[in-house]
Amino acid sequence: MSAQPTVVAEGVSKWFGQLVAVSDVSFDVGPGVTALLGPNGAGKSTMFRMLCGLAQPSKGTVRVLGRDPRLDVGVTRAIGLVPQQETVFERLTGREFVALAARLHGLGEPEREAERALETVGLDPADPRPLPAYSKGMRQRAKVAQAIVHDPQVLVLDEPLTGLDPRQRVDLVALFRRLGEEGRCVIVSSHVLAEVERLGSRVLVMSQGRLAAAGDFHDLRALMDDRPLRVRVRTDRPRELAGALLERGAVLGLRLDGDDSLELDTADARALARALAPVARDRGARLLEVRQLDADLEGVFRYVVEQ
């Protein structure tokens, strides 16, 4: 596995007249799975188009495998793209659609490679229906099949989990993880944060066209010194426990949530965990659940985008 970054963006901006879609974005991505996150209009799809050579940066440079995908058409053979757009060739079956992609990439046995790719994403190559007759989830999987049919080194996947049922999402997440573990560079955007978290912990977060954060989201959360950690505690005596924690100065703030829950704000989750058991014992309270609420990807994403 190469130590060099597979995909590099340096000072990339893209504007359309007076509209700035991407503003001075720099990052590098290596093998494995990296999630590109951001609200609608953050510039994710525009960034993906530049990574694949479909759009020219207004400023800055993009390199894929050390080459400019806009100028070096050869490098596009190493890229697989799942676009967010739903446009497909209406009269083609899934097999014909993927086989066409295989031919465009110059594969010697396009029909066989199409069958392999369709089976990889859980579709029947013998299905005679045209693509518009497929469900949304099936069309998404057909797009993934055409993106992997030529065994690319770089995969750019724009909202590939949209429209899939839970079982299909689990299967595609497992596929993306496997491709990343094989040494490919997989960059995937999604608004389904629970599934993204299963892909891995490396994230790029875009907001209003800018890169708001990059790195391991666990590390990003640890750097949020100005935001207290939030912990949910379920107990049979929430008011007594709340009073005792406030007396000891173990929390920065708290809220009662229903008949058996507290939401606690703390600067030190470990110190709070050490204090909870003896405080609960002293007040005769049973601890039913202790769970940190915002150490996950959703908490990090919400914090970064709001800044």
Image (tube, grey):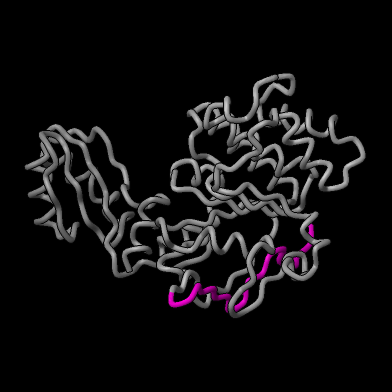
- Taking the image as shown, residue 84 lies to the left or right of residue 186, namely left
Looking at the rendered structure, the number of numbered marks drawn on it comes to 0
Front residue of 121/229: it is 121
Furthest residue in direction front, as rendered: 91
Q: Residue at x 51, y 32 (%)?
A: 164
Front residue of 112/174: it is 112
Front residue of 9/248: it is 9
Q: Which residues are magenta?
A: 1-18
Where is the N terminus found, in terms of image quarters? bottom right
Front residue of 157/252: it is 157
State which quadrant residue 134 falls in: top right
Residue 59 image offset from top left, x and y in percent: 59, 80
Q: Is residue 160 above or below residue 115?
A: below
- Taking the image as shown, residue 35 lies to the left or right of residue 292, namely right
Residue 267 image offset from top left, x and y in percent: 27, 62
Where is the C terminus found, in terms of image quarters? bottom left
Residue 86 image offset from top left, x and y in percent: 55, 42
Q: Residue at x 64, y 42 (%)?
A: 176
Q: Is residue 257 magenta?
A: no
Q: Residue at x 31, y 43 (%)?
A: 291
Q: Residue at x 70, y 37 (%)?
A: 145
State which quadrant residue 14 falls in: bottom right
Q: Is residue 142 above or below residue 82?
A: above
- Taking the image as shown, residue 254 lies to the left or right of residue 32, namely left
Residue 119 image offset from top left, x and y in percent: 72, 27
- Taking the image as shown, residue 299 lies to the left or right of residue 101, namely left
Q: Is residue 14 magenta?
A: yes
